[in-house]
C-alpha cells in the first residue's frame, strides 16, 4: 500500500510528562489524522475541485520554495499530510492543524483581492507548520493529553460555525479554553510573518500582497469586526507585528509597480474564484438575492471590459441562478462572462468549467460539449460527472482508474468510479471503489464494512458483471480488507497508548 493511503504510524510515541522537546512528526500526524477524519465527515467540509485547484496553484509554489529555502525538511514533507481543507463558512479564517492539515474558510477567498494576498496568508500558516510551532506548543502544554486537545480543537471548530449571539457565550468560552491550550505565542506569530513573507516573495508572488492583507486585517480589527474575522482572534495584530511588516516592506523596497498584464489576468482569475467562494459560502435568501442583484447590475451596465470584481459578480450570479433553477438567466449571465474573459486563457478555462457545471445542473449533460482537456482535477471530475449524467460510464472508468492510481486519496474520484461501475453492473468493483472512498477520508470502520460486503458478494458468486476479471478483483478486495483490519487494530492500540 502506498504511503498516501496509510496514516504514518512508525516512529516514537508521545513525549513523557515534563519533556520539553518537540512532539515527533509521526505523533503529530496521528493527531492530525484524527482531527481530519472528523472534518471530512462534517457537512461544512467542502471538497470543491475548482476552488481546490485554484488553492493548489498558490500552495504548490509555496511548498517548493519552502523546501528550496531549507524551511521544509524531507522528513516533515514525507510524514505530513499537506492537505488544504475548504470550510463552507462565510467568516474570514485560515488555520494550521497538527500533522500538516490546513483549513481555509470560503470567506477568506471571497474577501481577498489577489492571489498574492491569499499567498501571504497561506505562507504564514505554512510557516507555523514548518517551524513546528504546533508541536512546540503541545510539548509545552503536555499536561494536556493530545487526544483531549484534539477534542477541544473540534469543539472550537464546531462552535465557530455558529456565530449568532445566542451561542456567543459558548463559542467565546470554548475559544478561550482552546486559546489557552493551543495559541501561538507573539514570537511565533512574528516568526511566521517573517518566514512567510520570505517564502511568498521568493515564490514569485507580489510582496505588496502581504502589505494589503495586513491593511485589510487592520481595518477589520479597527471596526472591531471580530465576529466575521475569526482569523483576528487566533492571529491578533500586535503593534510589533504591524511595525515589523512595515519595516520589512520598506527594506525590500515595496514601491508597488504598475500592474503588469500578467498581474491583471491573475486578478481576473481570482475575481472569478472569489465569486465562486461567495456563491458556495452563502446559501441564505438574502445572500442569494444580493448576488443576483449584483450580477444583474453588471449585466445591465453593458460595459465591454469587466474588472475582476464585476466578473466575480457575474460568476456568482451564474451559480446562484442555477441553484434557483433559473437556467435561462444563468445562460445569459454566462454569455457575458464568456465574452469578458475571452482574452484570458486561464479565466476562460474556469468559465468553460462553469458552463459544463450549469449544463449538468440543467439536465443537458448529454448535449454539452466535452472539455478539450481533462488533465486538471476539476476538469477530470467535472467531465466525469457529465459522463455519468449522460450515461457514459465507460468513459468515466477509463479516465478515473488511472487518476486514482496516481491520487489514491481522492475520495470524490473513488465515489464517481463506484457510480460508473454501478451503471455498468459491476457490483464488486462498485463496492470496492466505495470502500476506497471511505479509506481516502480516513473512515476505516466504514471502509471495513464495505470490504466485508464485497467479500460476501464475491463468495456468493452473484457478481456476474465483472466477467473474467472477477477472480482478480476479489483477490484485491481480500488484500485490502486485511490491510484495513490491520490499520484498525493498530489505531485502537495507538489510541490506548496515547491516553
Ligand atoms: Zn499565525
Image (spheres, rainbow, N blue to C red):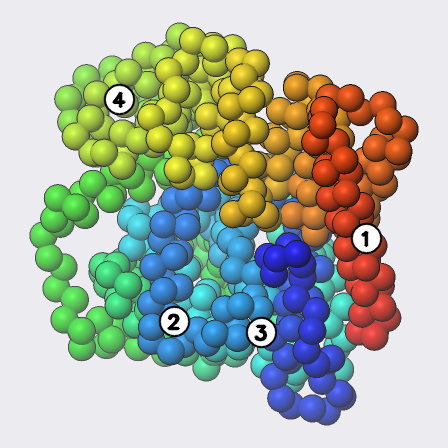
Alpha-carbon span between mark 3 and mark 1: 34 Å
Residue 366 appearing in the image = yes
Residue under the image location 26 percent in, 18 percent down:
336
Choose the circle earlier in sequence order: 4 or 1: 4
Alpha-carbon span between mark 4 and mark 1: 51 Å
Residue linked to disc 2:
67
Alpha-carbon span between mark 3 and mark 2: 19 Å
Choose the circle earlier in sequence order: 4 or 3: 3
Residue under the image location 30 percent in, 72 percent down:
198
Assess whether mark 2 and mark 4 are in contact (beta carbons under 8 angstroms).
Answer: no
Q: Which mark is residue 482?
A: 1
Name the front one of labels 4 and 1: 1
**Left or right of 232 on screen, residue 311:** left
Choose the circle earlier in sequence order: 3 or 1: 3
- Disc 2, SS: helix
Circle 1 Cα neighbour tier, 10 Å, few/some/many (<14 / 14–19 / ≥20) = some
Residue linked to disc 3:
134
Residue linked to disc 4:
338
x and y percentages locating residue 460 in the rendered image: 90, 28
Disc 2 residue: CB within 8 Å of ligand 1: no
Residue found farthest to the left? 258
Q: Which mark is residue 101?
A: none
Amino acid at each position: 500500500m502506498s504511503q498516501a493511503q496509510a496514516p504514518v504510524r512508525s516512529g516514537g510515541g508521545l513525549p513523557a510528562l515534563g519533556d520539553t522537546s518537540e512532539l515527533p512528526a509521526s505523533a503529530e500526524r496521528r493527531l492530525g489524522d484524527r482531527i481530519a477524519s472528523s472534518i471530512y465527515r462534517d457537512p461544512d467540509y467542502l471538497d470543491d475541485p475548482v476552488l481546490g485547484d485554484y488553492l493548489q496553484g498558490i500552495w504548490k509554489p509555496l511548498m517548493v520554495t519552502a523546501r528550496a529555502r531549507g524551511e521544509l525538511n524531507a522528513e516533515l514533507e514525507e510524514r505530513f499530510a499537506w492537505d488544504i481543507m475548504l470550510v463552507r463558512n462565510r467568516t474570514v479564517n485560515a488555520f494550521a492543524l497538527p500533522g500538516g492539515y490546513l483549513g481555509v474558510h470560503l470567506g477568506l477567498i471571497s474577501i481577498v483581492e489577489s492571489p498574492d494576498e491569499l499567498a501571504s496568508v497561506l505562507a504564514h500558516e505554512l510557516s507555523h507548520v514548518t517551524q513546528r510551532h504546533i508541536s512546540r506548543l503541545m510539548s509545552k502544554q503536555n499536561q494536556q493529553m493530545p487526544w483531549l486537545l484534539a477534542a477541544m480543537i473540534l469543539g472550537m471548530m464546531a462552535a465557530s460555525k455558529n456565530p449568532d449571539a445566542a451561542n456567543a457565550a459558548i463559542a467565546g468560552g470554548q475559544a478561550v479554553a482552546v486559546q489557552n491550550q493551543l495559541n501561538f505565542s507573539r514570537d511565533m506569530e512574528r516568526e511566521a510573518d517573517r518566514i512567510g513573507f520570505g517564502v511568498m516573495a521568493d515564490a514569485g508572488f507580489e510582496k505588496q500582497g502581504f502589505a494589503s492583507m495586513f491593511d485589510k486585517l487592520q481595518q477589520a480589527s479597527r471596526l472591531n469586526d471580530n465576529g466575521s474575522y475569526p482569523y483576528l482572534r487566533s492571529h491578533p495584530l500586535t503593534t510589533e507585528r504591524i511595525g515589523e511588516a512595515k519595516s520589512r516592506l520598506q527594506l525590500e523596497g515595496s514601491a508597488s509597480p504598475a500592474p503588469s498584464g500578467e498581474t491583471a489576468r491573475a486578478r481576473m482569475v481570482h475575481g472569478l474564484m472569489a465569486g465562486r467562494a461567495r456563491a458556495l459560502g452563502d446559501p441564505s435568501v438574502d445572500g442569494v438575492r444580493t448576488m443576483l442583484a449584483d450580477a444583474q447590475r453588471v449585466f445591465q451596465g453593458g460595459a465591454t471590459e469587466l474588472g475582476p470584481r464585476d466578473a466575480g459578480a457575474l460568476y456568482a450570479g451564474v451559480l446562484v441562478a442555477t441553484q434557483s433553477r433559473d437556467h435561462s438567466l444563468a445562460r445569459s449571465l454566462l454569455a457575458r462572462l464568456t465574452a469578458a474573459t475571452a482574452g484570458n486563457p486561464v479565466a476562460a478555462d474556469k468559465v468553460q468549467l462553469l458552463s459544463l457545471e450549469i449544463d449538468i445542473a440543467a439536465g443537458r449533460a448529454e448535449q454539452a460539449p466535452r472539455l478539450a482537456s481533462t488533465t486538471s482535477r476539476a476538469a477530470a471530475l467535472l467531465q466525469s460527472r457529465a459522463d455519468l449524467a449522460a450515461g457514459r460510464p465507460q468513459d468515466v472508468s477509463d479516465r478515473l482508474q488511472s487518476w486514482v492510481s496516481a491520487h489514491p486519496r481522492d475520495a470524490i474520484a473513488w465515489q464517481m468510479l463506484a457510480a460508473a461501475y454501478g451503471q455498468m453492473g459491476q457490483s464488486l468493483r462498485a463496492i470496492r471503489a466505495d470502500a476506497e472512498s471511505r479509506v481516502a477520508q480516513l473512515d476505516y470502520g466504514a471502509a471495513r464494512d464495505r470490504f466485508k460486503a464485497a467479500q460476501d458478494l464475491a463468495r456468493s458468486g452473484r457478481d456476474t458483471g465483472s466477467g473474467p476479471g472477477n477472480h482478480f478483483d476479489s483477490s484485491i478486495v481480500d488484500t485490502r480488507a486485511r490491510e484495513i483490519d490491520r490499520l484498525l487494530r493498530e489505531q485502537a492500540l495507538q489510541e490506548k497508548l496515547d491516553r
